[in-house]
Image (cartoon, grey):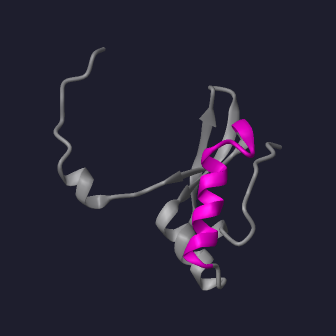
Amino acid sequence: MIELTAITGLNDAVIGVSTRNGVDKVLVYDRIKAKNLLFSANWTEERINVLFDELAIGKLGDLAPIFVHLNEELLDGIVDRPTIH
């Protein structure tokens, strides 16, 4: 069994698992969904920003979850490029 650091109440925002440093497995959250769930739990914008800031500066080190800002509009602008094989 793999142990992952999770944030209580944000299970519905989990979009997957990734690795950090090629070794440590961490949860990946949809940042917008996570923020909306925290708002629903009566968190303030300031408190949410503090949480994200603390995670960004490494309070949990290599075990900190990753928050991804999913942006569908950005995907429309991606141009396929040849890949190296």
Location of the N terminus (image quadrant): top right
Residue at 59%, 76% (x, y): give it.
37
Location of the C terminus (image quadrant): top left
Residue 23 in picture, x, y percent from top left? 69, 27
Q: Nearer the viewer, residue 42 or 17?
A: 42
Mostly what secondary structure, the magenta segment? helix
Residue at 57%, 64% (x, y): give it.
49
The residue most toward the front is: 46
Residue 46 counted in the magenta span: yes
Residue at 51%, 61% (x, y): give it.
31
Give the residues in magenta: 44-62
Residue 78 to residue 71: above or below: above
Residue 8 in picture, x, y percent from top left? 75, 68
The answer to whether 71 appears left or right of 45 in the picture is: left
Q: Nearer the viewer, residue 79 or 60?
A: 60
Residue 43 counted in the magenta span: no
Residue 62 to residue 75: above or below: above
Residue 45 in picture, x, y percent from top left? 55, 74
Residue at 24%, 59% (x, y): give it.
73
So how many labels did they put on this image? Answer: 0
- Quarter of the rendering containing residue 26: top right
- Quarter of the rendering containing residue 83: top left
